[in-house]
Image: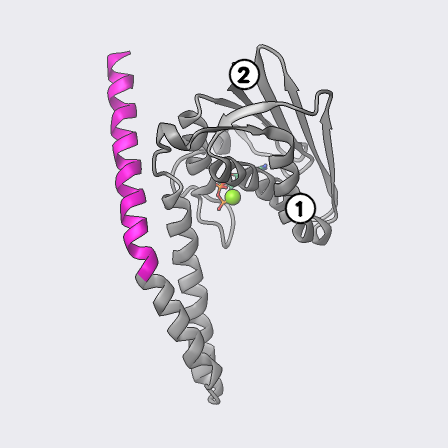
Amino acid sequence: TEEILHRQDKLAAVGQLAAGVAHEIRNPLTSIKGYAEFLSLDEKDQSRQELFDIILDEIERVNSIVEEFMLLSKPTIAALEKKELIPIIENVLSVLDYQLRKSKCKVELAFIEKHIEIECDENKLKQVFLNFIKNAIEAIGSGGTIRIDVKKEKEIKITIQDTGIGMDKEQLKKLGEPFFTTKKTGNGLGLMVSFKIIENLNGKVYIESEPNKGTTFHLSFPVVV
Ligand code: ADP
Ligand code: MG
């Protein structure tokens, strides 16, 4: 067990470093993006406009990586607050409304008890749900169902189930590895960051998946006392 602890410490340290570097990259990146957008506005030359489009796409790519890594910064104890869980999930679903419609995804959100409190950093927990639900939408592609169940027992239990393409054993093993992606425009950071945030909230995740059937993410968090 000592070795495992040691490794987790190292992972935490790497996460902090990545978050710090991401913060430093963000400001110059924002100005590069602003100026590139500004220059591309008056560009009349077609082939130079194409180059600007590539530059802007690539900036967006770096931006998505930076944003994921920034989420790794450790929540200070003071940043953890008691929040209502259901509205957090509902908020994420409304943010994703457009993508859900576009992909013809039906969403079922089921709970018996409406008022369930969770100890969290609200923005980071939203990011976790955003990552999981976005992945579900992308796994579905077009036409399917995402079912989210929330209940409070000895722990707070949340399952996110999709009827998407699913994963085989090899893929499942790689989940959470940085940069592991099977998508053309994926960055393979969403799950790594989400798992880290869940761990920081003393939560747990396990995953069930079957190719061509779908995937279920099971999350559990301590009940707020
Ligand atoms: P990205 O979405 O950028 O690829 P993630 O870390 O969010 O990165 O996910 C990593 C990989 O895990 C995805 O590329 C995909 O292969 C797999 N994956 C994650 N969620 C699901 C899901 N709900 N259904 C099927 N595959 C999934
Ligand atoms: Mg993703």
Sequence-wise, the earlier of marks 1 and 2 is 1
C-alpha distance separating marks 1 and 2: 26 Å
Q: Determine which residue is flagged by label 1.
A: 94
Note whether residue 216 is visible: no
Instruction: Name the residue nearer the viewer: 54 or 16.
Output: 16
The image shows residue 216 at horizontal and vertical percentages of 61, 28
Residue positioned 43% across, 53% down in the render? 64
Q: Secondary structure at mark 2?
A: loop
Residue range (magenta)? 1-27
Q: Residue furthest bottom?
A: 44
Q: Determine which residue is flagged by label 2.
A: 223
What sort of colour scheme is used for the picture?
A: one colour
For the residue marked with disc 1, what is the amino acid? Ser
Residue positioned 58% across, 23% down in the render? 117
User: In which quadrant of the rendered view does residue 211 lie?
Assistant: top right
Residue positioned 64% across, 44% down in the render? 137
The image shows residue 80 at horizontal and vertical percentages of 44, 29
Find out whether residue 150 is within the magenta segment: no
For the residue marked with disc 2, what is the amino acid? Val
